[in-house]
Amino acid sequence: MITLYRAPFSTNVERVGIALALKGRQVDSVVISYEDRSPVVEVSGQGLVPVIVDDGQVVADSTRILRHLDERYPEPRLFPSDPSRRAEVDIFLEWFNEQWKRAPNAMEDELEKPAPDPALVDELSRRMRATLPLFENLLDGRDHLFGDLSAADLAAYPFLKYGASRDPADDELFHRLLEEHLQLDGRYPRLSAWIARIAALPQV
């Protein structure tokens, strides 16, 4: 059985939760609070979730966990076996993690300052909204971002879903910002349908 260290409403944990369910793995969850990260620090040497312990192997970071799961439990595949298609997914993951997430993270940091810069907040909001047509176009003529369901869908969904709705119990600032600045408002029907499609997948 795999042990999954998680925290409530974590977007990165949700990536892994979907992957584990798709691969039919039994999971023992250890839920941490952001006020006490000691359980995950003790097992992994750092305080971020998700972390898994799989047959004694400790793996941290959601993208690394997705890769680990695909190598150890190949079906269904999350990373295409074809080298060119896998490269597309790898490039998307790097862009999403290192570039796309930069704007909402920077906005959260700015709004937590005593005197946020409204011009910077507006610019970061514009950057976030400007990516919505890209996702809409990726879904033209196909159900998932790169054709078949892949790690790209699992990586992006926990963030983009806030453009459609937010659990009222989820009051994290980062998630409220995603909800406010990614409003789909009926303008992105393919993206909205994709969000509903991924939401219907099982999760652990």
Image (spheres, helix red, strand yellow):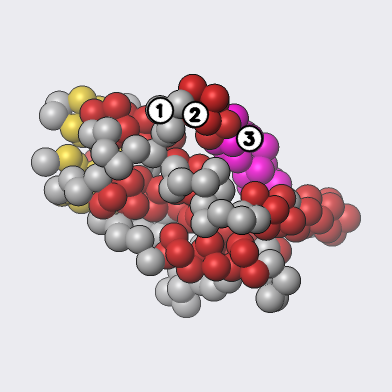
Residue occupied by mark 2:
86
Q: In which quarter of the image is the N terminus?
A: top left
Q: Where is residue 185 in the image (x, y as percent from the top left)?
A: 69, 75
User: What residue type is disc 3 on?
Assistant: Trp
- Can residue 61 be seen in the rendering of this structure? no
Q: Position of residue 202 (x, y in %)?
A: 30, 60
- Can residue 127 be seen in the rendering of this structure? yes
Decide: few, some or many residues near mark 2? Use Cα within 10 Å; few <14, some 14-19, many ≥20: some
Q: Which residue is drawn at 48% across and 68% down?
A: 196
Q: Where is residue 81 in the image (x, y as percent from the top left)?
A: 40, 28
Decide: few, some or many residues near mark 3? Use Cα within 10 Å; few <14, some 14-19, many ≥20: few
Magenta-drawn stretch contains 79: no
**How many labels, in total?**
3
Q: Residue at x 17, y 40 (%)?
A: 2
Q: In which quarter of the image is the C terminus?
A: bottom left
Task: State if disc 2 and disc 1 touch (CB < 8 Å).
Answer: yes
Q: Residue at x 67, y 37 (%)?
A: 99
Between discs 3 and 1, the one toward the N terminus? 1
Between discs 2 and 3, the one toward the N terminus? 2
> Hey, which residue is sitting farthest top in the picture?
83
User: What residue type is disc 2 on?
Assistant: Arg
Q: Residue at x 52, y 30 (%)?
A: 85
The correct choice, above or below, for 132 with respect to 79 in the image is below
Residue occupied by mark 3:
95
Q: Residue 81 has which mark?
A: 1
The correct choice, above or below, for 149 with respect to 56 in the image is below
